[in-house]
Amino acid sequence: MFFIIGLVVVIGAVLSGYLMEGGKIHVLLEPLPAEGTILFGAAVGAFLAGNTLNTIKSVVGNLAKPLKGSKYTKAVYMESLMLQYEVYVNIKKGGLLALEQDVNDPHSSNIFKKYPAVMHDHHAMDFFCDSMKLLINGSAKIDEIDQVMDMDLDVHHAESAAPGAAVGVMADGFPAFGICACVMGVVITMGFLDQPPNVIGGKVGSALVGTFLGIFLAYGVFQPLAKNIDQVLASEGAFFNALRAGLVAFGNGAAPVTAVEFARRNIPSPERPGSQELEEVVRQIKPR
């Protein structure tokens, strides 16, 4: 939402200032097809040449995220805390093996089904359930599980950084491609030096539109897009880290309510539920 508002403000401010100085919109629009073809064609070509297929797919899949924003709201975080508490309190009551079937097949679990926002996030579910399996099976100590989760988060961080970085590099190339478009326009203008000044001036003006577009697209559109993608994807890492904090605390012997408090303290402050709010909610959760 704010990405769209920001773009409207950028475009409105630039065009308003241009018109205040007596500029004509048609002067910008006439060379737009040719200049746009050079700019976008070169930028997209360089993007395809400089990235792997997985990165390209990731960029395409994440282009709409700045419009939607992060899905990890306060309500989703609260749901994750409730899920963790119910898992841990059932383990306290029935032992680790009481949750074996649930973590092996969470989509059939009557516990996980209560929390659809978390259950339908397959990356988060894999992260949590795969780590719970190590704890339940006794195949790893809690410090080893913590290390495995940390490694998983490192991989996730590297993968989530790739789309924003690729769009950022693309943005950095736009001013240079704008200069290329301008130089090509000047080369064309050289063939019109025998024409009246108004014709030559029009050709130079058209050439300079390429430089303007390159700088405008770089810093007014694609750099903000890259930054926004980075921030949205980083919120997923914060969600994973909260799951990790709760599980590790429980594995180290913390009571269920203490373990979810560890998880709550790892939630970014804008989305973090209050301590009293969480306590009132988990009080209503009973082991099956």
Image (cartoon, rainbow, N blue to C red):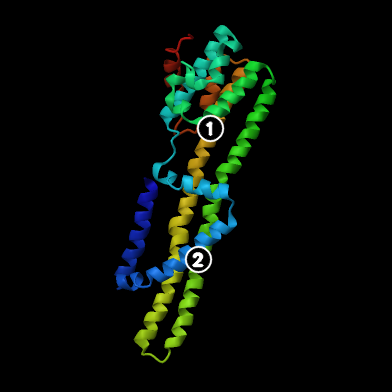
**Nearest to the observer: residue 14 or residue 107:** 107
Q: Which residue is mark 2?
A: 175
Instruction: Pick the quarter of the image with the N terminus.
Output: top left
Compared to 131, does 72 lie above or below? below
Mark 2 is surrounded, within 10 Å at the Cα level, by few (under 14), some (14 to 19) or many (20 or more) other residues, namely many
**Nearest to the observer: residue 284 or residue 204:** 204
Compared to 173, does 277 lie above or below? above
**Nearest to the observer: residue 58 or residue 262:** 58
First-in-chain label (2 vs 1): 1
**Can residue 266 be seen by looking at this rendering?**
no
From mark 2 to mark 1, how far is it between C-alphas? Answer: 37 Å
Q: Position of residue 58 (x, y in %)?
A: 52, 46
Which quadrant of the figure has residue 68? top left
Q: Position of residue 123 (x, y in %)?
A: 53, 32
Please report the residue visible at 55 percent of the width from the left and 42 percent of the height from the top: 160
Q: Which residue is mark 1?
A: 123
Which quadrant of the figure has residue 202? bottom left
Which disc, if any, is residue 152? none
Q: Is residue 265 left or right of residue 202?
A: right
**Can residue 186 be seen by looking at this rendering?**
yes
The residue tagged with tag 1: helix, strand or loop?
A: helix
Q: Disc 2 vs disc 1: which is toward the camera?
A: 1
Q: Amino acid at mark 2?
A: Pro
Q: Position of residue 40 (x, y in %)?
A: 46, 63
